[in-house]
Image: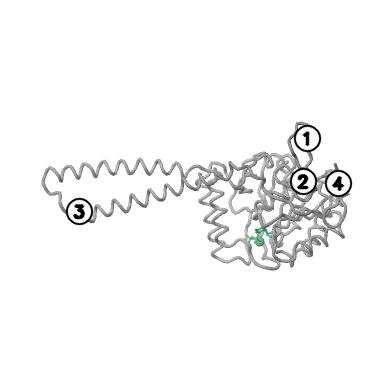
Amino acid sequence: MHRPALSVVIPCYNEAACLNLLHGRVSVAAEAAVGTDFEIVLINDGSRDDSWSVMQAIAARDGRVVAINLSRNHGHQLALTAGLDLCAGAQILIIDADLQDPPELLADMRATMAAAQADVVYAVRRKRQGETIFKRATAALFYRVLDRVTDTPIPLDTGDFRLMSRRALDAFLSLPEQARFIRGMVAWVGFRQVPFAYDRAERHAGETNYPFAKMVRLAFDAVTGFSTAPLRFASHAGLALTAASLLLLLYIAIGFFTGSAVQGWTSTMLVVVLLGAVQMFVLGMIGEYLGRLYIESKRRPLYLVADIAGPVRGHSTLGFNAAEPSPEFDQDGSASVTIDTPGVIGTRPIA
Ligand code: UDP
Ligand code: MG
């Protein structure tokens, strides 16, 4: 198996209008950096537009492009996981399809990586153009709260745009969880990681696929994936409330013995409502962790591949490939599916 010098991994959801320009700009930047020895891994994450046919066309005319069609929309973090799992490069660049992260920064990021002898160069957003104040404010708040509650230092204002070494990526791929907050998981892996400041551009076309609800879900995955602080909060709140109720008990006892114990609808209601709210909140928090535990315990593959166009070089460890006719069986009898087996899939034979 040939390991290219560079893999550029790009998750795409409804990005048909960006793909051709993206392919052009990424190819030029990659060629300037490593010559012809690179691959571009495009992942179609169940797009509703014609992203997949555009990708197939690109893969048909450029042998350095691998297009992977997931069986449905798996979400950004899993689509990106699929691309990382199936790429083979010695260095890996993660980039968004909408050209908000300029591919031309690749040369500088590689220089930074070499100079610092780093395993990860993560791009920190200095400015964000064309994004609403609400999005910027919630994002800024999110990164700061996350920093407070997690035990892993996760860099502020950093998305998934980054350059990684093969050993950092292999370490990342050894993390099997379903609920993936990739920027946090890469930080958790460690090695030498250095920041790289840049200005985030506007979307080239289309609109954001990260509406508020998805951002909230990502935020919950981030917090629950990297911290048990909310669970600790439950025991701390319990302790504080116990202390408070002991004081209240004292007050009630005094009232009883001095014979002034009748009034008190307000205080009774207050205690009932407050305790009810705290209990529901804590229960919900435990539920968040329990739900994730349940999902993780199923050990489902993280993504399902429906079709492949172009030469896949990587070895799938986290997903399931339905593009192959049937899984191979290892000598110990366990089934394993590899994606780098030659076969006729998608638009043309795999080299
Ligand atoms: N994306 C994806 N699956 C999804 C949503 C988004 O693969 O379900 C991709 C999308 O095509 C883009 C990247 O993830 O390449 C980031 O999404 P987007 O630009 O919409 O997010 P934003 O930059 O607005 O945070
Ligand atoms: Mg974007």
Residue 346 in the image, given as x and y percentages of width and height: 82, 56
- Relative placement, left or right, of 98 versus 246 is right
Q: CA distance from mark 3 to mark 2?
A: 69 Å
Mark 1 residue type: Asp
Which residue has dot 3 on it?
264
Mark 4 residue type: Pro
Q: CA distance from mark 1 to mark 2?
A: 30 Å
Question: Does the closest atom of ligand 1 sit within 8 Å of the Cβ of label 2?
Answer: no
Choose mark 3 or mark 2, whichever is in front.
3
Crowding around mark 2 (Cα neighbors within 10 Å: few <14, some 14 to 19, many 20+) is many
Give the mark nearer the N terminus: 4 vs 1.
Answer: 1
Residue 241 in the image, given as x and y percentages of width and height: 33, 44
Give the mark nearer the N terminus: 1 vs 2.
Answer: 2
Mark 3 residue type: Gly
Query: Which numbered circle lies on residue 330?
Result: 1
Choose mark 2 or mark 4, whichever is in front.
4
Asked which secondary structure carries label 2, the reply is strand
Q: CA distance from mark 2 to mark 4?
A: 24 Å
Choose mark 3 or mark 1, whichever is in front.
1
Do residues under tags 3 and 4 come within 8 Å of each other at their CB atoms? no
Which residue has dot 4 on it?
342
Asked which secondary structure carries label 3, the reply is loop
Do residues under tags 2 and 4 come within 8 Å of each other at their CB atoms? no
User: Which quadrant of the figure shows ligand 1?
Assistant: bottom right
Which residue has dot 2 on it?
91
